[in-house]
Amino acid sequence: MSGTRAESCAGDRALHRAALALRSAGLWICAWLSLVSCSWPPSIVVVVPSIPAGSATLSVLVSSAGKQATEMPRLDVAAFAGQAYRFGVHPPLGSVGVFSVAIAAYDKGGCLINATSGDIELTAADNDGFVYGRPERDLQLPLDAAPMEYAASCHNGVPTIRSFVQDEDDPTLVIITGWGFAPGITAQLDGVALTNVVRKDATRLEARLTMIASPSGLRGGSLLLTNPDGKTATLQVSVYGVSFAPRSKNSYPLDTALEPVAVAVADINKDDLPDVVVSGLRNTSAGFLGVYLNQGGGKYPAKPDVLELPNTGDDLAILDVNQDGHLDVAVISTMGGQLLVALNDGTGHYNPGQTQLVALPLGFVPIVVEDLGIITPDVVELRQQLGLQGMKVLQFAFDGDPDNAYLPHTYGSDCVVYTGTHDNQTTIGWFQSCNEIERQQIQTYIGADGSDIAWDFIRLAFESVADLAIIPLQDVMRLGDDARMNRPGIAFGNWKWRYLSHQLNDGLARGLRELAGAYGRLERPAIERGYDPFDYSAPDTAHPLYDRHDSTGVK
């Protein structure tokens, strides 16, 4: 027995010496390799100038165009109240482009305190693969205070639903965000319990729902959350009743320099398989024609055969132009005022030497310029010289500046006015997110208390001198942010909102007609002929100008 112990101890000492030797050698090897061959991604150093009092954790979200957003683990910052806090974010090796970083501060109970976001651009110079001298890019992100009702709802245990999203690849999985989600919370949709409810924290739930088929593939439902103390939250949601194949299985990305606009399908190489032809924008000003030849089994090449065009390819058609038995492609370019004809060489390929350009007398093209953001005087001058209309978005107007270019009293007629675009919150959701000072300014400007803010803004748009007024359907139906179309910078959950037929009624149409008539936006010849394009024989019920309790169920 003693001999065995001695041998064991001797063996342990030998192993220990060997481990030390390997460790030392490994350190030298790693150091040598780092000098000659190692490469590391650039780091983004996020700087929070001051951690809010009461903060326990920070959550981090990193995303970039074309890349899935990445959630970073929560960082413990409980000991840094009132101090600056720095941490590194490391995108993948070789990453370039604009990265968006969003952070949020939570208290020890998981309630949201502050949040903010910012963008930073990484270039090839930031990612040269050289360990020493590799720049680190600082991103300063001062935290903005969250609305007080968020924390109040969370602390009082009153749940509030912000969003309901089905997973893109697995629609039985839903993500519910909001505040005040207590441990043991339950979820129901139209009285049917959601299963596998997982409380990630006080602001996020994941659950499973039962798929119910519907004729349109989409149905409405009432979502109910109930905390153990009986406090509840409800939200009307739209639910998909069908599943879709994951996009990754049949996705064929284009080069980032190519922006597709139009697509057509035809057997262009005569192999009895449908091929795909796309056209669009290349490098902001020129165009392209891209051909995907079907490889059989529904598969296409990873990259198309690309023919560069001198102007944008805004629309296309496939036909045998020269009657040689091969399908050619005709592409229209509104920017260049040209018809571009690409002749098929007989094998399904289109060569530069076989492209014909025909000038078209297009005359006036009603183009609206997206002149949003920081607009310099020379940009305005160019737009005016070209006779193009700009955009005016009412949600951008109320920053306290009486000369704000988005306030209707500053408009000329050469513009199009919107209450909001597809990238904005709904008007109701936006107004609810404004602070008291902003709300007071809005109320003073519109001469109303904002209780019907969506239709107040519709009236404001219609009474402006803008040539055209465009109103999102969500604002017409007085819907909140649960009906928002798109959240820029968020990879998933967008472009899912659909209206339901019962949400449209004669009252909404009559209200729009009445406002359009009051401000001269009805078609003049129609009025002179005594023809009313909105002449409904049904009773004038649920008139939105007088009764806000219409069939949408939204006040």
Image (cartoon, rainbow, N blue to C red):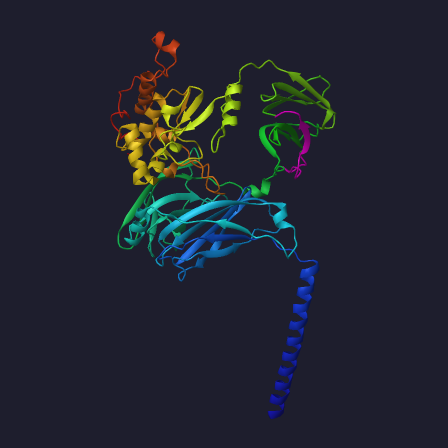
Looking at the image, the residue that sits furthest to the top is: 529
Q: Please say if 343 is above or below 11.
A: above
Q: Quadrant of the N terminus?
A: bottom right
Quadrant in which residue 257 is drawn: top right
Asked whether residue 554 appears in the rendered view, the answer is no
Is 170 within the magenta? no
Residue 240 appears left or right of 299: left
Taking the spot 63% from the left edge, 19% from the top edge, the residue there is 338
Q: Please say if 109 is above or below 408.
A: below
Is 297 within the magenta? yes
Residue 322, image x, y percentages: 71, 17
Quadrant in which residue 331 is drawn: top right
Residue 396 appears left or right of 323: left
Q: Quadrant of the C terminus?
A: top left
Q: Please say if 546 is above or below 253.
A: above
Residue 473, image x, y percentages: 39, 29
Residue 44, image x, y percentages: 54, 51
Residue 422 appears left or right of 98: left
Looking at the image, the residue that sits furthest to the bottom is: 2
Q: Which segment is the magenta one? A: 294-312
Near-viewer residue (9 or 241): 9
Near-viewer residue (336 or 465): 465
Asked whether residue 236 appears in the rendered view, the answer is yes
